[in-house]
Image (tube, coloured by chain):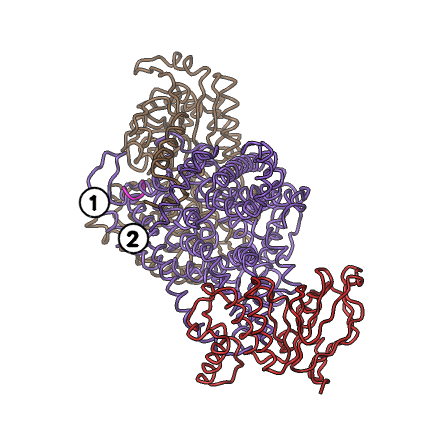
């Protein structure tokens, strides 16, 4: 009871002295304001309220129309398949692979590949993967007709299958890489090495030891990222457009279709669908939590059974190893496909390689490409710079020093389905006469970039020896001076790293860019998705390749930068 | 009799061209506790890791280690059956005290018998009634005792103690040390303690010179 | 909230929430109003237009179209002193949302968009919401050249009278195409399409409605399968919809099982359909542009043996337009650009299949002989339907059929 009071008094007194005290409220406003207004702006129309059209009468018609939509049941089933399926498979691959690979040489290789694989935007991954696995894709071409006897692409439901299995598996592979990176980060937070040694010295096989002793503690650390994965898988749009079924699509793309309809009733219905997805995600996270409890309870017996090795960890480990191998091969294959297609002159079925190589499409696309790269990069740099600055200021102001509650707030944009509040945000920008401007796109992207930058930067920031700053200030340096002259130089590399991650996130954002840009601000991602459905594959290859290279270059730049921090942090 | 203990023959340890240990030979009989004294950097923790089987691949190693007349150098950690007590207690945070202990009981033992062994261990550690407790609520000395009992419940053929008391304050250290030594002796297994605390005296004390560097 | 998130007190929080919109709203600025009355002479309009910047929001999904708009910008700059900016958009309906927001917040002038490219549903929605400025089309000096008799869709956009609120820009027509090397005699009627699909299972596909091309195929089939087409040119009547569309569903019930992926999956849009033809997964594709096949051949996406054709009973044809938003800040400039787009020079260029390939909205007998020569000189590609078959045109049904057919299709086949 006494605790909350103390917290408030601390933050107040800190604010009085802290020259950065204004940063948290500002960040909070930029962050939570648009989300709340956005949700509100989506909620009102879902009950028939449209102040813009002078409609102030409460109505349940949008909800009735939505709930009686003939495609709803199927679409919901697809959504749940993709949401739970992709997340569960990603979790199994993530934990299974680290369980078997932990401490091996292969793990070092996987770790080294993670950062670039993570910088691979979902959109270009999907485009490249489609080139790889479609019935007319590279794998089929490599095997045809000599091995398969196919003299035309087979009539096989490989991508865009009506049950969205392809979408689910592709997303699972992509997300497993993200999860492994989170697991690697969490490994540093707990004493994993000693715990493993301890369990193994009691006779436990390595993978089993990891799963029984390390995994549950890691899981507690990566729970929020997993919820974010679940939420995003339940409301996936970009990959669903490329790899998912069209009749009907999962809920989020279907909602997007409705938003685009010119029928007012249909747009109200879309608002109801968008709010429904928020409820769906909340229920899904609760269900997932229930699942966690069930798994934990059923694991209790295993913990104390004394069994040192068995089939279960081998099966989970093999699934993990195969999964991670698939994820890495799929990523590499996807990039290769983008390069192949971008340089293809003509490449007809079933040639394994283009009959002619050509730079013609690159030459033809150079103007568009320059424009898109320039715009994506400028937005990305601006957004990541602002996000980094706000993060540093908030950290200076003491945000998140004691309680983990801020973390949950930070995760809001990642936990709330984008479509649930982006429609409302579009109305907000529209009201401010900013829709379709770079400013609106950048401000909207900030919501999604800030959490990542904060998560990446807060650990190294807090790891910095506080005595250094105290020493500087005892010599008479002001807080501001200490920040700029002492802390930031020491943190140059983590700051650059956080900016690079922010940049990568910004460049890859699809739905926020599309809504805030009102179709007028095209970036590499929106263009890649627009071209993905089947326009010129060479052009799609070029755009998606550029989309891949841009964030990758940002990360590479950081790695090339001199390693200043080595002397100070451990 | 001595051949059934833990025997180190001419053990060399080095890293990056630097020699840490140069030809250490040592025999520890069952029931005997040997203290290895040395300053930090003298290679004593690396030796523990070498015996336990967790030494990093980047170390250069030579020499044999036998336990109960079996050469264990090529065995992975989990097949050496050597218990370890670390500086940190590393109780598993997601398990209760009782589960931590039950985790160590070998398989193939009936449920009632497992429970009895856990209860006995708690009694031995003077922690009766602590089975359902969260390890995080234990004091440092209690944690250390649980960690030791957990290592011993796995029925190790030898015990390694890697500065296990260094995190405890002076009065507690004395009690935990006495508890550890009596409990290990009761199992009649060889034990090796590395420390830089001159108080941690046991049956035999070997001091590693910094001259080895 | 005794324990506020972020360690922020309620007062600071509300302060922050206030800062943001205030900070952002500083960006909007009004522009001076221009006055164009019903009697303003064309010369005066051209004078007013000089020096104006016209922001033209137009779909930018095709480099050819972007190049054409780029050429237009250069030409109107040189001749009329107008700065034409192509506001590229990938979403052809978003402008309605934007204009609606501006209208409801009282921004009646100084708008950021001066001209939009639209037709059918967009026009119906925008006009219905009073978002367009006009009438202006009939006051354009080139209006007299428009073939309003021969091409009634230039004044009846999806059955809706344009009433001068949009100016025609080009014609589009549904055309089918195939590779003559592998398929010599493609089916030329909707029933024949089904027969062909039955004997070539898995080789026919159509985009999943509510995609535009997909619904156009449904409309085409519906018109061809119905004896009485009159109801389709009126708004959908829910009471009679089921009976009126029964022949279509009977047809699709037979077609889907023998279609691509046995009707379990559908390509999402036209480009995917074309790609399926490119990969020889299907034998016939179709697009809402007769020169699409030729364009694809020229870009190396389809073999040179590709041929395009119009169905025997004709195919759906429509017109696309440009319109001026109610709050445009360069209405005179937009009128001059719209007028230029109607000029024989611009229309002939638009009709050139090497540059774009849209049929003209003009009555060629009304244009000067010199300009007629421009059209006569246009190349005739082998992948273009012949001129006679292009004359077999069906008018677009009422816009309400678009949504109704899409919904009914989803209810039957997407559940």
Magenta span of residues: A41-45
Q: Please give the residue where the numbered disc 1 appears in the rendered image.
A: A59
Q: Position of residue C366 (x, y in %)?
A: 40, 23
Q: Is residue A69 above or below residue A536?
A: below
Q: Which chain is purple?
A: A
Q: Would residue A314 be found to the left or right of residue B59 on screen? A: left
Residue at 51%, 55% in the rendered image: C183
Chain of the residue where label 2 is placed in the rendered structure = C
Disc ID at residue C408: 2
Please determine if labels 1 and 2 lie on a single subunit: no
**What colour is chain B?**
red
Is residue C282 in the magenta section? no
Instruction: Tell me the SS state at disc 2.
Output: helix
Q: Would residue A380 be found to the left or right of residue C90 on screen? A: right
- The dominant secondary structure in magenta is helix
Q: Which chain is brown?
A: C
The quarter holding residue A517 reads top left
Q: Is residue A136 visible?
A: no
């Amino acid at each position: 009871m006494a605790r909350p009071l103390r917290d408030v008094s601390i933050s107040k007194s800190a604010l009085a002295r802290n020259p950065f005290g204004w940063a948290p409220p500002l960040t909070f406003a930029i962050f939570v304001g648009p989300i709340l207004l956005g949700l509100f702006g989506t909620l009102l129309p879902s009950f028939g309220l449209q102040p813009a059209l002078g409609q102030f009468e409460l109505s349940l018609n949008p909800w009735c129309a939505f709930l009686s939509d003939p495609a709803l049941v199927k679409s919901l089933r697809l959504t749940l398949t993709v949401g739970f399926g992709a997340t569960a498979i990603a979790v199994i691959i993530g934990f299974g692979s680290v369980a078997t690979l932990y401490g091996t040489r292969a793990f070092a290789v996987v770790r080294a590949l993670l950062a670039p694989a993570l910088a691979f935007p979902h959109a270009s991954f999907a485009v490249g993967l489609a080139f790889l696995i479609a019935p007319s894709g590279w794998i089929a071409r490599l095997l045809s007709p000599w091995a398969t006897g196919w003299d035309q692409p087979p009539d096989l439901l490989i991508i865009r299958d009506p049950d969205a299995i392809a979408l689910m598996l592709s997303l699972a592979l992509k997300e497993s890489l993200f999860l492994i990176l989170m697991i690697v980060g969490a490994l540093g937070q707990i004493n994993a090495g000693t715990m493993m040694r301890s369990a193994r010295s009691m006779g436990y096989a390595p993978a089993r030891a990891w799963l029984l002793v390390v995994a549950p503690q890691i899981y507690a650390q990566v729970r929020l990222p997993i919820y974010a994965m679940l939420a995003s898988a339940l409301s996936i749009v970009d990959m669903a457009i490329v790899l998912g079924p069209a009749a009907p699509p999962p809920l989020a793309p279907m909602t997007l279709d409705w938003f685009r309809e010119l029928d007012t009733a249909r747009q109200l219905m879309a608002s109801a669908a968008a709010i429904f997805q928020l409820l769906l995600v909340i229920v899904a996270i609760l269900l997932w939590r229930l699942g966690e409890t069930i798994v934990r309870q059923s694991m209790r017996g295993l913990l104390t059974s004394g069994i040192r090795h068995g089939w279960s960890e081998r099966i989970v480990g093999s699934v993990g190893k195969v999964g991670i191998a698939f994820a890495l091969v799929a990523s590499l294959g996807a990039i290769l496909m983008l390069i192949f297609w971008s340089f293809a002159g003509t490449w007809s079925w079933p040639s394994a390689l283009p009959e002619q190589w050509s730079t013609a499409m690159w030459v033809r696309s150079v103007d568009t490409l320059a424009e898109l790269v320039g715009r994506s990069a400028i937005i990305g740099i601006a957004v990541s710079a602002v996000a980094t600055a706000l993060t540093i200021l908030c950290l200076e102001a003491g945000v998140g020093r004691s309680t983990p509650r801020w973390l949950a707030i930070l995760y809001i944009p990642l936990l709330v389905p984008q479509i649930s509040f982006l429609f409302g945000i579009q109305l907000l920008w529209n009201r401010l006469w900013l829709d379709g401007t770079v400013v609106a796109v950048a401000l909207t992207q900030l919501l999604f970039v800030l959490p990542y930058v904060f998560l990446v930067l807060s650990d190294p920031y807090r790891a910095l020896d506080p005595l250094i700053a105290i020493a500087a200030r005892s010599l008479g340096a002001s807080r501001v001076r200490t920040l700029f002259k002492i802390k930031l130089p020491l943190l140059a590399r983590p700051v650059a790293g956080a900016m690079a991650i922010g940049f990568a996130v910004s460049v890859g954002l699809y739905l926020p860019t599309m809504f805030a840009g009102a179709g007028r601000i095209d970036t590499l991602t929106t263009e890649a998705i627009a071209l993905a459905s089947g326009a010129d594959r060479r052009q799609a290859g070029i755009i998606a390749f550029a989309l891949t290279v841009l964030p990758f270059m940002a990360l590479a730049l950081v790695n090339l930068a001199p390693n200043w921090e080595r002397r100070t942090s451990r | 009799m001595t051949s059934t203990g833990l025997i180190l023959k001419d053990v060399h340890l080095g890293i990056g061209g630097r020699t840490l240990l140069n030809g250490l030979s040592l025999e520890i009989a069952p029931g005997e506790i040997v203290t290895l004294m040395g300053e930090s950097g003298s290679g004593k923790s690396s030796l523990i890791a070498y015996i336990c089987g967790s030494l990093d691949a980047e170390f250069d190693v030579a020499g044999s280690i036998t336990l109960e007349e079996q050469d264990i150098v090529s065995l992975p950690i989990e097949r050496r059956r050597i218990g370890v007590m670390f500086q940190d207690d590393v109780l598993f945070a997601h398990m209760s005290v009782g589960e931590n202990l039950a985790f160590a009981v070998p398989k193939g033992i009936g449920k009632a018998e497992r429970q009895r062994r856990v209860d006995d261990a708690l009694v031995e550690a003077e922690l009766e009634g602590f089975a359902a407790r969260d390890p995080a609520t234990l004091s440092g000395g209690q944690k250390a005792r649980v960690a030791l009992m957990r290592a011993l419940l796995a029925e190790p053929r030898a015990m390694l103690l890697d500065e296990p008391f260094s995190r405890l304050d002076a009065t507690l250290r004395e009690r935990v040390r006495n508890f550890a030594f009596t409990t290990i002796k009761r199992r009649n297994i060889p034990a090796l303690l590395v420390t830089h605390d001159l108080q941690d005296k046991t049956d035999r004390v070997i001091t590693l010179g910094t001259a080895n560097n | 909230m005794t324990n506020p998130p972020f360690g922020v007190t309620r007062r600071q929080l509300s302060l922050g929430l206030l800062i943001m919109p205030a900070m952002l709203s500083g960006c909007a600025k009004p522009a001076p109003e221009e006055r164009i009355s019903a009697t303003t002479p064309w010369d005066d309009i051209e004078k007013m237009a000089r020096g104006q910047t016209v922001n033209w929001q137009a779909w930018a999904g095709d480099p050819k179209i972007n190049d054409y708009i780029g050429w237009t910008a250069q030409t109107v700059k040189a001749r009329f002193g107008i700065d034409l900016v192509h506001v590229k958009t990938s979403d052809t309906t978003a402008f309605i949302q934007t204009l609606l927001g501006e209208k409801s917040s009282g921004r009646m002038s100084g708008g950021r968009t001066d001209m939009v490219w639209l037709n059918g549903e967009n026009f119906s929605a925008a006009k219905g919401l009073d978002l367009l400025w006009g009438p202006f089309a009939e006051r354009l000096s080139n209006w007299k050249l428009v073939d309003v008799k021969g091409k009634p869709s230039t004044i009846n956009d999806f059955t809706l009278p344009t009433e001068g609120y949009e100016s025609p820009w080009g014609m589009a027509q549904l055309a089918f195409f195939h590779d003559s090397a592998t398929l010599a005699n493609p089916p030329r009627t909707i029933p024949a399409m089904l027969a062909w699909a039955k004997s070539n299972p898995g080789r026919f596909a159509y985009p999943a409605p509510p995609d535009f091309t997909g619904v156009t195929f449904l409309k085409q089939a519906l018109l061809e399968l119905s004896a009485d087409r009159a109801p389709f040119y009126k708004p959908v009547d829910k009471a009679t919809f089921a009976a009126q569309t029964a022949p279509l569903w009977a047809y699709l019930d037979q077609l889907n099982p023998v279609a691509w992926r046995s009707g379990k999956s559908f390509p999402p849009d036209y480009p995917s359909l074309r790609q399926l033809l490119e990969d020889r997964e299907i034998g016939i594709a179709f697009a809402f542009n007769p020169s699409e096949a030729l364009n694809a051949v020229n870009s190396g996406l389809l073999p040179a043996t590709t041929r395009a054709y119009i169905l025997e009973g004709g195919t759906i044809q429509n017109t696309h337009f440009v319109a001026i938003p109610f709050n445009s800040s360069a209405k005179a400039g937009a009128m001059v650009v719209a007028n230029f787009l109607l000029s024989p020079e611009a229309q002939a260029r638009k009709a050139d299949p090497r540059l774009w390939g849209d049929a003209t909205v003009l009555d060629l007998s009304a244009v000067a002989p010199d300009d007629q020569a421009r059209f006569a000189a246009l190349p005739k590609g082998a992948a273009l339907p012949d001129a006679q078959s292009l004359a077999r045109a069906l008018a677009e049904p009422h816009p309400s059929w678009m949504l109704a057919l899409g919904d009914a299709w989803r209810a039957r086949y997407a559940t």
